[in-house]
Amino acid sequence: MPEIVFHGPCGIVEANYTAGKSGYAALVCSPHPLYGGDMDNNIVRMLYDMHVNLGNSVMRFNYRGVGRSVGDFNAGYGETVDANHATDWLLDNNPGCLGIHVAGFSFGAYIASQIAVRRPEAVSLLCVAHPYTLYHSEFIEDWVPRTLMIDGDQDDFVGRYELLDKNIKRATIADTDHFMTGKLPEMARIIEEWI
């Protein structure tokens, strides 16, 4: 997975990118940068690798102020802007792209949901442990129809998504927390069946 940099509004954004041949691209968003979240998180890496295996061109990146990315945390707004720039980079480097799969873990699921409602190129949204009660995603009714939300039944950071559209696929994994501790293989199986 080659390391790249692209330019966002604050300067350099550090990322990993693997080119694929499926015609689709994927963007994977990291957990909260103020709590140690970065593109090397195990769930982010797993989602990235799944897209590589599918043949998609895929990117994961560090938000501003993390790793070599320039800038400071901006309460979700700036991180959404960075993700939007990452989406632009993916489209610029994948001419004729058929669509973008957007995914994220925790805070990254919130950022991914913001991209999915703002970008017509988004064809799917995968949210792992979306902290819905902390970061209310706007425009839920505008989320892409192909959406999967996964959480653990012992996760203290997510709601049960009661307000979400009934057409959004949801999966709650038993006996696990926000970090899917001990349940990554089960989570991977759910995602593979959905894909």
Image (cartoon, rainbow, N blue to C red):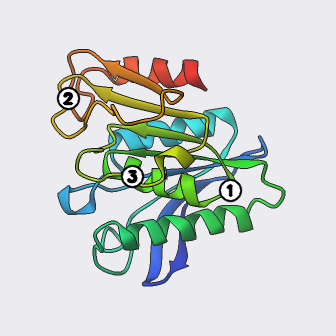
Q: Earlier in the sequence, mark 2 or mark 3?
A: 3
Query: Residue 26's mark?
Result: none
Write down the residue under mark 1: 120
Between the C-alphas of marks 1 and 3, the distance is: 17 Å
Q: What SS does tag 2 mark?
A: loop
Write down the residue under mark 3: 137
- In the rendered view, would you say 37 is above or below 13? above
Between the C-alphas of marks 2 and 3, the distance is: 21 Å
Query: Residue 177's mark?
Result: 2
At x 20%, y 31%, the residue is: 155
At x 23%, y 22%, the residue is: 153
Percent x, y for residue 162?
A: 33, 31
Q: Earlier in the sequence, mark 1 or mark 3?
A: 1
Q: Amino acid at mark 3?
A: Ser
Viewer-nearest residue: 108 or 181: 108
Percent x, y for residue 164?
A: 42, 36
Can the viewer see residue 126 in this picture? yes
